[in-house]
Image (cartoon, coloured by chain):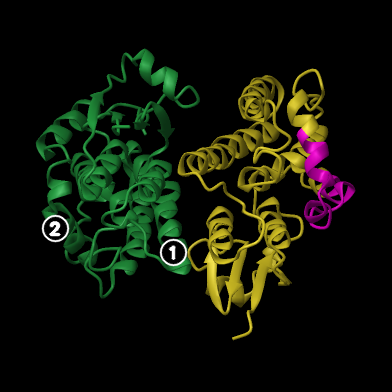
Chain colours: A yellow, B green
């Protein structure tokens, strides 16, 4: 049977981009079906009835939801560049840091971004602490995955583009060589990869979006 | 090298119990090192510096944190009863529902439990909806894993004991055959398994704890 790989996604969503980067790294051709989150398609509601969110991977018609679950599925389904190391302990470490990004960093960054004044100042201090903890995993390495991009790098795509945009809109100077040198170096290296370059939306587009949405109260996609 | 498996845990924590159930199902001998969360041990802080929470599995001295990450590690490290199916799609489904329990159910249950009056009523309606969605996965099956306990069942241990206790303390009648028949049947089946029976704390103990802590403002362990 010919493989049919479709992605219900959104070019501007870091969660959706994760799946695209992984598929490109593995060399899997896919059809992107862009979703309009203001007017969700019956296809999205049918295939992700629990969360009604992108990304949803449709592999031969079968839906898989939640970006990290999809990444594990891609890793287990297709050979090619591995997204996870072979050693179970190293795999556990990768899963731990992927979870750290999603469960800790994303929420704290978003909350700090949406707050104001003193509350934002405090929130941004917390963001810096979390990012310092995260970048400690880059010591002596090019990527979180070592010499090559792996699961943690892909999950961290949010730091390669959206983080900088949110900080710029909030007027916070944090992503610099003094405060987060290893993360800044990682952003450069990550953005050089062709699978990433081909996938992430133009910075100016994301910046325009968030400037327009500055008063929004929460993320609408994941 | 002789295997050394230690668990920094807490008998009363559903997250810690998950790891114990998995180790018992796999037949792995381990030493439980009980933690006092009011006075965290240097061992816990050393081995889980990021979250400082139980459970932490120490396998030949190497720490693994976060209960679901530990479950995947156990699955990949030791043979014996499988915790995940072989098929990548079925594995993705298991990971999706495990994530649903942790990311959606746990927080919503806890929030509803801690609220009062009309807010609690609304919160409990949401809890019921989530649990109905979850129990739909039990249709025609004994366990979430099929005929045998699997990863989702283990992650759902929270529903087998703590959920009922919280609902009792809150004075909410929800875990009954009319509202959640499949989940009630699952609780019976799950609690019959020897690995579960040997692990979960006595209901009365958990009930006494939560009655005493009724005014607490948030969970202190995970």
Mark 2 neighbour class, 10 Å CA radius: few under 14, some 14 to 19, many 20 or more: few
Q: Is residue A179 left or right of residue B41?
A: right
Label disc, if present, on residue B188 of the rendered structure: 2
Q: Is residue A137 magenta?
A: no
Q: Position of residue A197 (x, y in %)?
A: 83, 52
Residue A91 visible at all: yes
Eye-nearest disc, 1 or 2: 1
Q: Are marks 1 and 2 in contact (CB under 8 Å)?
A: no
**Which residue does the image show at 78% across and 37% down from the upper left?**
A187
Prevailing secondary structure class for the magenta stretch in the rendered image: helix
Q: Chain of mark 2?
A: B
Q: Residue furthest right?
A: A204
Residue with the mark numbered 1: B93
Q: Using the rendered image, report if marks 1 and 2 lie on a common chain.
A: yes
Q: Position of residue B21 (x, y in %)?
A: 23, 45
Task: Please name whichever residue, A49 or A146, is drawn nearer the observer in this view of the structure.
Answer: A146
Q: Is residue A160 left or right of residue B217?
A: right
Task: Please name whichever residue, B141 or A198, is drawn nearer the observer in this view of the structure.
Answer: A198
Secondary structure, mark 1, is helix
Q: Chain of mark 1?
A: B
**Which residue does the image show at 43% across and 68% down from the upper left?**
B87
**Which residue does the image show at 47% across and 68% down from the upper left?**
B89
Task: Please name whichever residue, A174 or B63, is drawn nearer the observer in this view of the structure.
Answer: B63
Residue B179 visible at all: no
Q: Is residue A193 magenta?
A: yes
Quarter residue B81 falls in = bottom left
Q: Is residue A147 left or right of residue B60?
A: right
- The alpha-carbon separation of the residues under discs 1 and 2 comes to 23 Å
- Magenta stretch bounds: A186-208
- Check the image and report above or below for B130 versus A217: below
Quarter residue A188 falls in = top right
């Amino acid at each position: 049977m010919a493989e049919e790989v479709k992605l219900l996604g959104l070019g501007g969503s870091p969660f959706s981009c994760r799946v695209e980067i992984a598929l490109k790294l593995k060399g899997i051709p896919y059809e992107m079906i862009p979703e309009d989150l203001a007017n969700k398609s019956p296809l999205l509601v049918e295939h992700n009835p629990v969360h009604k969110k992108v990304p949803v991977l449709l592999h031969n018609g079968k839906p898989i939801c939640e970006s990290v679950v999809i990444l594990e599925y891609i890793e287990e389904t297709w050979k090619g560049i591995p997204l996870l190391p072979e050693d179970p302990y190293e795999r556990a470490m990768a899963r731990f840091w992927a979870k750290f990004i999603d469960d800790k960093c994303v929420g704290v960054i978003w909350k700090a971004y949406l707050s104001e004044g003193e509350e934002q100042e405090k929130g941004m201090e917390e963001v810096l602490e979390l990012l310092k903890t995260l970048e400690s995993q880059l010591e002596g390495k090019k990527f979180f995955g070592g010499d090559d991009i792996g699961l943690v790098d892909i999950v961290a795509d949010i730091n390669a583009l959206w983080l900088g945009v949110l900080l710029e809109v909030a007027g916070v100077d944090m992503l610099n060589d003094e405060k987060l040198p290893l993360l800044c170096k990682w952003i450069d290296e990550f953005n050089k990869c062709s699978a990433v370059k081909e996938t992430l939306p133009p910075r100016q587009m994301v910046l325009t979006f968030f400037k327009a949405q500055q008063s929004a109260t929460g993320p609408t996609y994941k």
